[in-house]
């Protein structure tokens, strides 16, 4: 298979569907025979994953690697930020903890992390045929654009084309697309090759007029509308729809406490496929009810979240319910269940704190993070094998040496503790419920107690995930213009783009030929049946070329003033009046121009340079013109902003000119 160009998925906002689309494309490319890898330079999420060699990365990139049918590796997510307060995060670089930093400090150090990002990306390029990059939040977050390393800054580092994903389900989709594009620099806007509308409900024909209008406004084609679909793949952040479930359903009622810094809530995703289970998330005391199972999940700040649990009244309620249901703690939730938590080195909160008291255990936090994939067996039933991974800071020990341990690890150590009846237990093992046999035995025991039967269908969680990835693949194949995407990846100019995207031409310099080149292009365009609108600044209506162009079908030469003074001969008042008149003419031109294939503004650049035309309205029009319109500008001394707007820049410089030898302008040659 040939190497393909990298492709980046960015979004108009958080949770627009970037992760979802990137995962689906990873699956498509894999099924089409390419070795594909996901990549996200900087991920901010509390859901993380441990690779086989013990490095920590964002859970979303591990999920995307699963979709691509490759082993997750640390290069797929070189920087992971795990928020541990309202103002700061734990910063993980290349899978290892660098430290805890306030947002302001991290913002200052971002540029120093670019080498690590580039090294990771290039390592993937050497191993894979195609890389699917994912951005974060929105590329239009103007307060964060300086030293950007995750959106357009990353696209530039990777030289990647960008597809922009927008969520229509939350409303305002066209405003979010248009606003995002408008806030980008011209060179950034050029990287966006296609727009994807995500989560659409209804008849797409109703949407089509809007799609055409947004294409005209942005100059970027809409390459797909993805229908709203219930496809169950791992989410990466706290905006996940999974965390919004509140209602109590039928069967086994499992209530997960939604802690302020909840992490790795994907630990409970396997319950979603069990028809006998109702899984919900609880944030208030009044929502808890009388569940069959209460789960205290992982958290990035155990002591802070324990304080919240206490103040919310949920701690006391959980303690009262402990004899009537099962209470389970995973990682940080397990630490909360003990008698005491100590943080002598201020790893989290500092000092010591009383635990819930569900288990006679003690946790002491330490600087060194424990992480790694683990294999174990259930201590009370060694026939039940369990795979999982640990990510935690601290060690938990029992006050009572006779306390029953929960898991026996293959390295001979133990993990977790439980009460004698095993209805209250805790473990550091993330992913414990992903193990089919363990999950089935756990649920069967509860069903028997509830008198709801003794049989649970044997469901493979791994098989279920593969089915979801295949559904996602088919959804995107049906919705997206894959021919367009493959043309981007191959580096071949896209036929759709070739036919529909207009370009901006600049002919500038002090040499003769700028207007001549523009008029020659007008003749060529007219010969191809295109419509042309032309206006000449700083000139009267006497130029010879106008006589021919006026006679050509499809060409409209707007008349200007009958007499034009050189600016060097104008008074200050005349210059001010001339500027106003030229700006008014420009607005009139804009109102007419949208109906034309080509707009020629002769000497517009020089008029701007002389202070006789405003530049900003012209640049705004160029950015928002119909996507198929060609714009030709001529003159001297273009600004950097104008040069950035252009697709063609032709500098026509003087080496020799008869004016220097006293020869005046000649009719039919110079004018």
Image (tube, grey):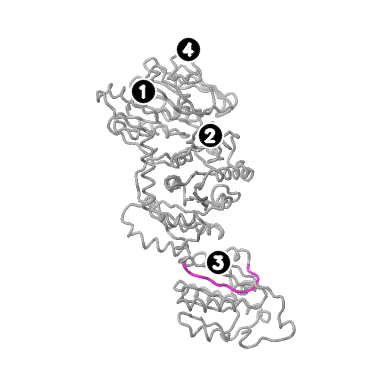
- At label 3, counting other C-alpha atoms closer than 10 Å, the crowd grade (few under 14, some 14-19, many 20 or more) is some
* Mark 1 or 4, nearer chain start: 1
- At label 2, counting other C-alpha atoms closer than 10 Å, the crowd grade (few under 14, some 14-19, many 20 or more) is many
Q: Which residue is mark 1?
A: 326
Residue 120 showing in the rendered view: yes
> In front: mark 1 or mark 2?
2
> In front: mark 4 or mark 2?
2
Cα distance, mark 1 to mark 4?
A: 21 Å
Q: Does dot 4 land on a helix, a strand or a loop? A: loop
Q: Say whether residue 328 is magenta.
A: no
Q: Which residue is mark 2?
A: 56
Location of residue 119 by image quarter: top right
Cα distance, mark 2 to mark 3?
A: 45 Å
* Mark 3 or 4, nearer chain start: 4
**Compared to 637, does 660 lie above or below?**
below
Q: Say whether residue 636 is magenta.
A: yes
- Picture coordinates of residue 666 (x, y %)? 65, 87
Residue 400's tag is: 4
> In front: mark 2 or mark 3?
2
Residue 619's tag is: 3
Q: Does dot 2 land on a helix, a strand or a loop? A: strand
Report the front residue among 175 and 181: 181
**Compared to 643, does 321 lie above or below?**
above
Q: Mark 1 and 2 residues: CB-CB less than 8 Å, in contact? A: no
Classify the position of the C terminus by image quarter: bottom right
- Picture coordinates of residue 275 (x, y %)? 29, 33
Report the front residue among 153 and 362: 153
Question: Horizontally, is 290 left or right of 96 in the view?
Answer: left
User: Furthest residue to the top?
Assistant: 402
* Mark 2 or 3, nearer chain start: 2
Cα distance, mark 3 to mark 4?
A: 75 Å
Cα distance, mark 1 to mark 2?
A: 31 Å
């Amino acid at each position: 298979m040939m190497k393909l160009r990298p492709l980046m998925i960015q979004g108009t906002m958080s949770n627009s569907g970037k992760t979802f689309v990137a995962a689906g494309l990873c699956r498509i490319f894999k099924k089409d025979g390419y070795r594909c890898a996901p990549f996200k330079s900087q991920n901010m999420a509390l859901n993380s994953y441990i690779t086989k060699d013990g490095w920590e990365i964002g859970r979303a990139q591990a999920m995307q690697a699963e979709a691509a049918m490759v082993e997750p590796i640390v290069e797929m997510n070189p920087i992971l930020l795990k928020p541990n307060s309202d103002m700061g995060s734990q910063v993980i670089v290349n899978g290892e903890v660098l430290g805890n930093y306030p947002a302001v400090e991290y913002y200052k150090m971002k540029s120093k992390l670019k080498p690590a990002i580039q090294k990771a990306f290039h390592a993937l390029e050497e191993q894979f045929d195609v890389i699917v990059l994912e951005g974060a939040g929105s590329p239009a977050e103007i307060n964060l654009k300086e030293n950007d390393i995750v959106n357009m800054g990353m696209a530039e580092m990777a030289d990647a084309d960008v597809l922009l994903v927008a969520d229509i389900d939350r409303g305002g989709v066209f405003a979010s697309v248009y606003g995002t594009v408008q806030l980008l620099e011209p060179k950034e806007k050029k990287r966006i090759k296609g727009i994807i509308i995500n989560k659409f409900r209804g008849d797409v024909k109703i949407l089509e007029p809007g799609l055409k209008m947004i294409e005209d406004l942005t100059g970027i084609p809409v390459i797909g509308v993805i229908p709203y679909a219930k496809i169950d793949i791992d989410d990466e952040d706290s905006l996940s729809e999974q965390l919004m479930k509140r209602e109590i359903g039928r069967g086994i009622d499992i209530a997960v406490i939604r802690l302020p810094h909840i992490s790795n809530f994907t630990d409970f995703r396997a319950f979603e496929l069990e028809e006998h289970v109702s899984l919900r998330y609880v944030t208030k005391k009044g929502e808890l009810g009388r569940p069959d199972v209460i789960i205290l999940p992982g958290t990035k700040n155990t002591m802070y979240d324990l304080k919240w649990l206490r103040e919310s009244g949920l701690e006391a309620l959980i303690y009262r319910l402990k004899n009537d249901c099962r209470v389970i703690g995973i990682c940080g939730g397990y630490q909360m269940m003990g008698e005491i938590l100590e943080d002598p080195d201020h790893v989290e909160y500092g000092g010591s704190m009383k635990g819930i008291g569900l288990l006679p255990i003690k946790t002491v936090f330490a600087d060194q993070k424990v992480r790694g994939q683990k294999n174990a067996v259930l201590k009370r039933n060694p026939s039940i094998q369990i795979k999982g991974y640990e990510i935690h800071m601290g060690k938990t020990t029992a006050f009572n040496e006779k306390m029953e341990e929960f898991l026996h690890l293959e390295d001979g150590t133990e993990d977790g503790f439980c009460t004698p009846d095993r209805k209250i237990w805790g473990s550091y093992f993330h992913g414990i419920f992903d193990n089919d046999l363990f999950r089935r035995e756990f649920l069967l025991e509860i069903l028997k107690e509830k008198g709801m039967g003794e049989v649970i269908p044997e469901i493979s969680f791994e098989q279920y995930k593969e089915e979801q990835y295949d559904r996602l693949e088919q959804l995107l194949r049906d919705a997206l213009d894959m021919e367009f995407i493959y043309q981007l990846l191959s580096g071949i100019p896209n036929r759709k783009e070739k036919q529909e995207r207009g370009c901006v031409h600049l002919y500038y310099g002090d040499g003769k030929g700028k207007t001549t080149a523009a008029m020659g292009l007008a003749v060529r365009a007219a010969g191809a049946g295109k419509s042309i609108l032309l206006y000449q600044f700083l000139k009267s209506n006497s130029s010879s070329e106008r006589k021919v162009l006026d006679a050509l079908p499809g060409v409209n030469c707007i008349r200007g003033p009958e007499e034009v003074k050189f600016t060097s001969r104008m008074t200050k008042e005349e210059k001010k009046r001339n500027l106003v008149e030229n700006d008014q003419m420009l607005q009139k031109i804009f109102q007419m121009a949208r109906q034309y294939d080509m707009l020629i503004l002769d000497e517009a650049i020089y008029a701007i340079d002389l202070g006789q035309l405003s530049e900003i309205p012209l640049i705004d029009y160029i950015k928002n013109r119909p996507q198929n319109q060609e714009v030709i500008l001529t003159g001297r001394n273009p600004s950097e902003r104008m040069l950035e707007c252009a697709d063609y820049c032709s500098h026509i410089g003087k080496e020799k000119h008869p004016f220097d030898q006293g020869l005046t302008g000649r009719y039919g040659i110079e004018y």
